[in-house]
Amino acid sequence: MILILDNGSQYTHLIKRNMRDLGREGEILNNKTTKIAEVEAKKPEAIILSGGPSSVYAGDNGVSAHVVKKVAAEWDIPLLGVCYGHQLIAHELGGEVAKGSSAEYGLGRITVDEEDLLFKGVPKEFQVWVSHFDEVKKMPAGFEALAHSPTCAVEAMRHKEKRIFGTQFHPEVWHTENGEKILENFLSCI
């Protein structure tokens, strides 16, 4: 089972649909009302942190913040952060998130710098759906950038040793070319 923590994104249900399309069961839990013990009791094969409208500096980041720390320190399961989830991973593990030089809302293009696991079998450049103003300005220790765009230096990142990934763009929406392939690649590390 793939656990999807909903951080308030309008696209969270699309992550669950993609999991189903890829032959996996997905379950959505609310970031603000779920407790860390509930997450642990589910024994997920992987966890996906959805996007959302909040800033990582807005206050209580809910159970998603605890999950990031648990996966980094204790749990040996894959973790993918999307948009806000991507920023939360960076923030909670010692990176820096701040306002971007320009907001990105709609279609954008990214360039893959490091194929790695997430981008196996996808083109070097392709169209993605973006919806954010904050972005990762400095990655946490142990992370490497996988992709960039003209306005965002860290469109995707991963931990060099652990199965922790983040994408600033939304792979779950149909506007993102190769989005389902990226999610399939993430699931391949289970």
Image (tube, rainbow, N blue to C red):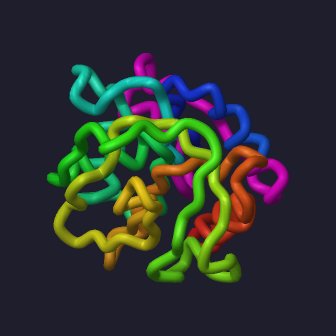
Task: Answer whether residue 97 is visible to the viewer in this image.
Answer: yes
Q: Is residue 45 magenta?
A: yes
Task: Please tell me in which quadrant of the rendered image residue 56 appears.
Answer: top left
Q: Position of residue 50 (x, y in %)?
A: 52, 38
Give the residue displayed 15% in from the left and 52% down from the top.
94
In the image, residue 67 above or below residue 111: above
The residue depicted at 46 percent of the width and 81 percent of the height is 114
Name the residue rendered at 56%, 44% in the picture: 130
Count of labels in the image: 0
Residue drawn at the location 67% of the way across and 59% of the way down: 127
Residue 162 in picture, x, y percent from top left: 35, 71
Q: Which one is nearer the viewer's eye here, 166 or 169? A: 169
Residue 2 shows up from this direction: no
> Which is nearer the eye, 38 or 21?
21
4 up-or-down from 63: above or below: below
User: Magenta residues, as a range?
Assistant: 18-47
| Quarter of image, res 165 | bottom left
Q: What is the residue that sits farthest to the top in this orientation?
A: 33
Viewport quadrant of the C terminus: bottom right
Q: Residue 4: x and y, percent?
A: 57, 40
Left or right relative to 7: residue 118: right
Given residues 174 and 18, the one toward you in this image is 174
Tell me, yes or no, whether the highlighted magenta stretch contains residue 31. Answer: yes
Percent position (x, y) of residue 23?
A: 82, 58
Residue 63: quarter of image? top left
